[in-house]
Amino acid sequence: MGKIGVNNNSITYTFPPTYQLFLLDLNCSDSKILLQKANQQNLFRPPFTWILWDQDNYQNMQNLYFRIDSKIFTIHKLKDKNIHSIKSFYKLNDHSMEFMEDFLAEWKHGHGFLWYNFLTFRNRSNLIGMDMKISSTASFADENNHLDDLKDTHSDASLKVTSALLKVITEMVNITPVMLYDTGSNKCRGMIDDLENGRAELPGNSLFISLDKIETIDFLVPCCPFSLKFILRAPPLTYVSNLFILPFDQYVWLSCVILLIIMCNMAYLIALWEVHDPVFKEMDHKNQVEQLQPRILDNLIMQIGILTEQGAEAEPKSFSGRITFVFSVIAVMFLFTAYSANIVALLQSTTESTNTIEGLFNSNMDLGVQNNSLIEDMFKLSTDPLAKVAYDKIFTKDKQSKSMSLEEGIARMRNGFFAFQTNPSSAYKEIAKTFEESEKCSLTEVSLFKRRDPYTAIRKGSPYRDIIKIALLKLAEIGVRNRFIERIYTRKPECLGQGANFASAAILDCYAAYIIYGIGVALSFNFFLLELLIHKKFGNTRIRSLVVKKIKKTAVAHQ
């Protein structure tokens, strides 16, 4: 408790405001001057504490503003009694001329407290129908007319939750809301200006915490969940991988190559033996099936025919060769069956490579955002390198085609490989109306920004800060806030049609097959050109001599 004097231009104190106590005897001649100075210096605000001695008449203090959250106590001795009455008093607002009293206790010398009730001082939540201005703004046209109903809950759900909470609070603390709607071009800035200039006490919207607002706005409690995510249908595996190499892992593929080499070597050895054995030469004249020749290329083509279950033109003549041939077919049959079964399963599978923001950016999937100024501002203000990459891809390059309405973005996401960034609650509301049950099973969320929940706020230095905050905490504690969130926000739809989610093979699924076929055509064309070049250089002489030698050799073999 420090000393104060009337000759000073201002009242000074030596302790921190939390521990500063002013004790003033109102019988002093200059007490009114001290009270006026304290009022000018705003010393009746918390956390300062005042005790006014011997005061029972407020007529001399009508022009003083004792805030509703102030801690000002009076001690007055009752007439004809040795009892001191302890009271606190305050005004509802700075325009009021009437003081509100709280009787706290009575004290008597030698007996102590006769009674006391300090809870009355703490509970000043009844504002007796006082007018309180609330500045609000809406992101979409005609939204202020549908704050109380559940129409278009996908548009600015946080505004509807905040409005519902404020409506309950006005009844809890008994105030009359006076709504101010901003209609300017920068609506959010107009609402904040109303709070900074004292034209409004409460914002009708929830606000995000930022450095430029902390000095002028008090953030009370979180209002509702808010997040921006890329919503997409997970693409099939063929979109990011070669489907035809996925059924087997690298060790199985290596085993298949070794098996192919073994089968080619066995077939080559058997063919070499049968060609040089005269018994099989005699059998070759009686059998219409061409005998397998000991040529590496022929054996390789035969084994490829077996692997692809296409058969072979030539076959071994010996029992051992045929046994090798049959067991080769059986072994390949099991491999082919396993490969085909896995292919069918993979055709209906989706990739997980786009479940991360890095994988999404590295894919060829188109990106888009909802045409909302808040989303663009979050991209601009973010310091995340990935957010800057996304900003360049979405806003810098061809912004008109990347920024779109919610309905257009959801439609593009449904019909193609497209990732659309918006509030998930808004997206799922539209998805529930337009998607088939089987289409909902492939929905995926990818987060770029960390979750930032908006806060219910109040004007900086408002005397009603604690009253509103306590009311909001009560609503959160008893579940009223969660009830509004459940009614207004839309959850991710459940997958109820997984069994019906069958998709036919598309051209993209057969992309690798077309590539292989194209490589084969290109190789054959190149060899064709090489043959033409050789034929043009050497002429028909070389070919004629080779044909004659072949005919003579065949004739000698048949003699």
Image (spheres, rainbow, N blue to C red):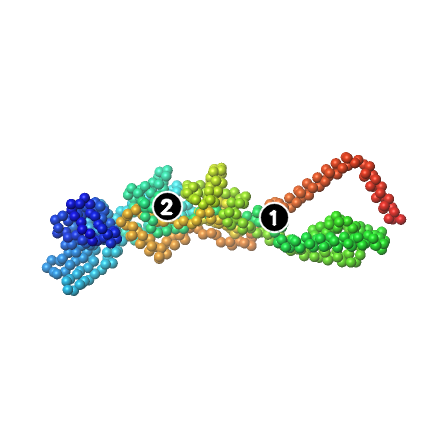
- Residue that lies at the very extreme toward the bottom in this rendered image: 111
Q: Which mark is residue 395?
A: none
For residue 548, above or below residue 316: above
| Coordinates of residue 318 in the picture (x, y in percent) | 80, 56
Q: Which residue is mark 2?
A: 210
Q: Residues within 10 Å of mark 2 (few under 14, many from 20)?
A: few
* Amino acid residing under circle 1: Asn
Q: Residue at x 32, y 48 (%)?
A: 218
Q: Quadrant of residue 107?
A: bottom left
Q: Nearer the viewer, mark 1 or mark 2?
A: 2
Q: Residue at x 52, y 52 (%)?
A: 441
For residue 142, above or below residue 291: above
Q: Which residue is mark 1?
A: 242
| Coordinates of residue 304 in the picture (x, y in percent) | 71, 50
Helix, strand or loop at label 2? It is loop
* Amino acid residing under circle 2: Ser
| Coordinates of residue 32 in the picture (x, y in percent) | 15, 47
